C-alpha cells in the first residue's frame, strides 16, 4: 500500500513509518518540525540525541535497502498538502501531525491558540485535500482517551449508534476534556465525522491512552534510528518520566493523590493498533472510533511498580506527591469499554517488572544526558494556583 505518515519525525510517527516500510509498503513521511522548534524554544532535549529526519531516512535506506519518501511542509499550508496527496495518491493516511502536549496547550493564551489552530485547521486542510485528490483513502487519526477524561459514565467507542435498520448514526459520547489540547482532538473528531457523513470519506479515530516505551525492532537497528524519548514536563508521558526519574535517583513526581485511573499502552501496541486499523478499513462514509489502550492503572500503581523494579535493580527512589498542577478529579471510576480493535488480533505488550527493568537498563546507559531540571512541572492550569501563567 501507499502509506502517508503525517508527523513522521515524531515519537510515534517515525517508528510507524519504519514499521510499514519494513513490511514492504511504499511510505512517505511529512513533517514541519514544529515539535523540534518547541524543544529549542524551551531548551528541552529527548534522552537520546535524535538524528535529523533526513539523516534517519537516508540511514534507513542504507541499513534496510528500503526507501522512505520525505517531504517537509505544514498542513496549515493547504497548497502543500494538496500537492502531496495529488502526487503520492496515498491509500492510507496516518495522521500524527499535531501539537501533542496537554501541558503546553495550557501554558499561555498563545500556546492554547497555537495548539487549536495547528491541530484543527491543519486537519481541516487535510480533509479538503483528501476530498479533492484521494477521497477513497482511509484516514487514520490519532485521537485520545482524554476526550472523555472527566466523566464517570460508561462509554463505548465513539460515534456509532447502530439502528435496527442497519443504518448507523454518528452520535458522539458526551465529552469532558482536560485541556485545550484534548479539546482540539474533539473539534477534529467532529470535523472528520461531518466530512464522512457529507462527503463519504472514511476514517478511523484511534482514541489512544498514554503511550510509554521507546524501542522497537527497527529503532534497535542503529543508534541513529531511535525515536525521540521525552521525560520532561512538557512532552514526557508519565511512565517515561518515572523511569528516568528513578535512574536519576530523584523522587517520582506523582501529581495530587495519584488515585485517578488512566489507560496506557506500549509504543509497540500503538503501531500494531494502527496496522490493524489500516488492514481493516471502514466503509466509505463511515467514521469509526476505537478505544486504543491495553491496561488501566492509577498513577500511584505506576509509581509503585517503577519503585519496586528500581529497588530490585539496586536503586532506591521515593515517591513524592506534588500539588496537582492540573485540574483532574481524583478517584474517578474508569468505565471504558475495551477496544474493539483488539478483537482484530492484538497480543498486547503489558507492563511487567521485566519490561520496566529492561527500560531502566536502557535509560541507565544514557544517564549522563539526564537533566533533572525538567522533572518538576512548570505549567499549572488550576485557577487557584499561584503559578498559573495564562495571559
Ligand atoms: N502525571 C503525574 N506525574 C507526572 C506526569 C504526569 O502524576 O510527572 C499524571 C497526570 O496528572 C495525568 C497522568 O499522569 O493524570 C498522565 O499524564 P501524561 O503527562 O502522561 O499524559 P497526558 O498529559 O494525559 O497526555 C498524553 C499525551 C497525549 C495523549 C494522552 C492520552 O501527551 O498526546 O493524547 O496522553 S490520554 O491521557 O489518555 O488522553
Image: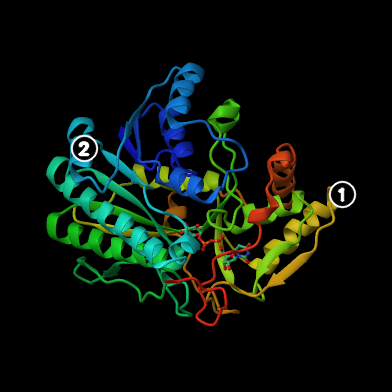
Name the element at disc 1: loop
43 or 311: nearer the viewer:
43
Q: Is residue 16 visible?
A: yes
Q: Earlier in the sequence, mark 2 or mark 1?
A: 2
Classify residue 380 by image quadrant. Answer: bottom right
Locate residue 348 relative to residue 86 in the image: left or right.
right
- Residue placed under numbered mark 1 in the picture: 314
Q: Residue at x 17, y 61 (%)?
A: 197
Residue 151, percent from left and from top: 46, 78
Going by the image, does 90 lie left or right of 273?
Answer: left
Residue 258 x, y percent position in the rendering:
65, 72
Relative vertical location of residue 139 with respect to residue 165 in this rendering, above or below = above
Mark 1 and mark 2 in contact (Cβ < 8 Å)? no
The residue that appears at 28% across and 48% down in the rendered structure is 139
Using the rendered view, name the quadrant where residue 116 is placed. Answer: bottom left
Picture coordinates of residue 383, whole percent (x, y): 50, 80
**Mark 1: is the Cβ under 8 angstroms from ligand 1?**
no
Looking at the picture, tell me which residue is in the foreground, 55 or 198. 55
In front of the other: 382 or 341: 382
Q: Residue 251: where, in percent of width, then height?
A: 76, 61
Q: Is residue 121 above or below residue 215?
A: below
Extreme front residue here? 391
Please say if 35 is above or below 65: below
Q: Nearer the viewer, residue 200 or 29?
A: 29
Tag 2, which secondary structure? helix
- In the displayed orientation, state which residue is furthest to the right: 314
* Residue that carries the numbered disc 2 in the rendered image: 85
Amino acid at each position: 500500500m501507499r502509506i502517508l505518515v503525517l508527523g513522521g519525525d515524531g515519537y510515534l510517527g517515525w517508528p510507524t513509518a519504519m514499521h510499514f516500510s519494513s513490511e514492504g509498503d511504499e511510505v512517505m513521511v511529512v513533517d514541519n518540525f514544529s515539535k523540534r522548534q518547541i524543544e529549542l524554544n524551551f531548551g528541552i532535549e529527548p534522552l537520546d540525541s535524535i538524528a535529523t529526519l533526513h539523516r534517519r531516512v537516508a540511514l534507513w535506506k542504507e541499513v534496510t535497502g528500503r526507501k522512505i519518501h520525505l517531504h517537509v511542509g505544514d498542513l496549515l499550508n493547504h497548497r502543500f498538502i494538496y500537492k502531496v496527496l495529488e502526487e503520492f495518491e496515498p491509500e492510507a493516511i496516518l495522521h500524527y501531525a499535531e501539537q501533542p502536549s496537554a501541558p503546553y496547550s495550557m501554558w499561555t493564551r498563545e500556546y492554547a491558540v497555537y495548539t487549536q489552530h495547528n491541530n484543527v485547521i491543519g486537519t481541516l486542510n487535510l480533509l479538503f485535500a483528501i476530498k479533492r485528490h484521494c477521497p477513497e483513502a482511509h484516514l487514520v487519526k490519532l485521537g485520545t482517551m482524554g476526550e472523555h477524561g472527566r466523566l464517570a459514565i460508561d462509554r463505548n467507542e465513539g460515534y456509532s449508534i447502530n439502528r435496527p435498520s442497519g443504518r448507523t448514526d454518528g452520535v458522539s459520547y458526551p465529552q469532558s476534556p482536560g485541556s485545550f489540547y484534548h479539546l482540539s482532538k474533539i473539534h477534529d473528531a467532529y470535523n472528520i465525522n461531518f466530512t464522512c457523513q457529507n462527503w463519504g470519506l472514511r476514517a478511523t479515530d484511534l482514541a489512544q491512552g498514554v503511550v510509554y516505551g521507546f524501542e522497537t525492532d527497527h529503532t534497535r537497528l542503529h543508534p541513529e534510528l531511535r525515536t525521540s524519548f521525552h521525560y520532561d514536563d512538557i512532552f514526557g508521558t508519565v511512565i517515561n518520566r518515572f523511569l528516568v526519574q528513578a535512574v536519576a535517583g530523584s523522587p517520582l513526581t506523582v501529581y495530587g493523590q495519584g488515585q485517578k485511573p488512566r489507560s496506557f499502552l506500549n509504543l509497540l501496541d500503538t503501531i500494531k493498533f494502527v496496522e490493524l486499523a489500516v488492514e481493516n478499513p471502514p466503509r466509505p462514509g463511515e467514521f469509526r472510533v476505537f478505544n486504543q489502550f491495553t491496561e488501566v492503572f492509577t498513577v500511584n500503581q505506576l509509581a509503585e511498580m517503577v519503585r519496586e523494579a528500581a529497588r530490585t535493580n539496586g536503586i532506591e527512589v521515593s515517591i513524592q506527591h506534588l500539588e496537582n498542577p492540573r485540574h483532574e478529579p481524583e478517584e474517578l471510576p474508569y468505565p471504558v469499554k475495551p477496544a474493539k480493535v483488539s478483537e482484530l488480533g492484538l497480543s498486547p505488550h503489558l507492563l511487567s517488572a521485566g519490561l520496566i527493568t529492561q527500560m531502566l537498563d536502557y535509560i541507565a546507559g544514557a544517564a549522563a544526558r539526564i537533566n533533572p531540571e525538567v522533572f518538576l512541572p512548570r505549567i499549572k492550569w488550576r485557577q487557584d494556583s499561584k503559578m498559573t501563567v495564562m495571559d
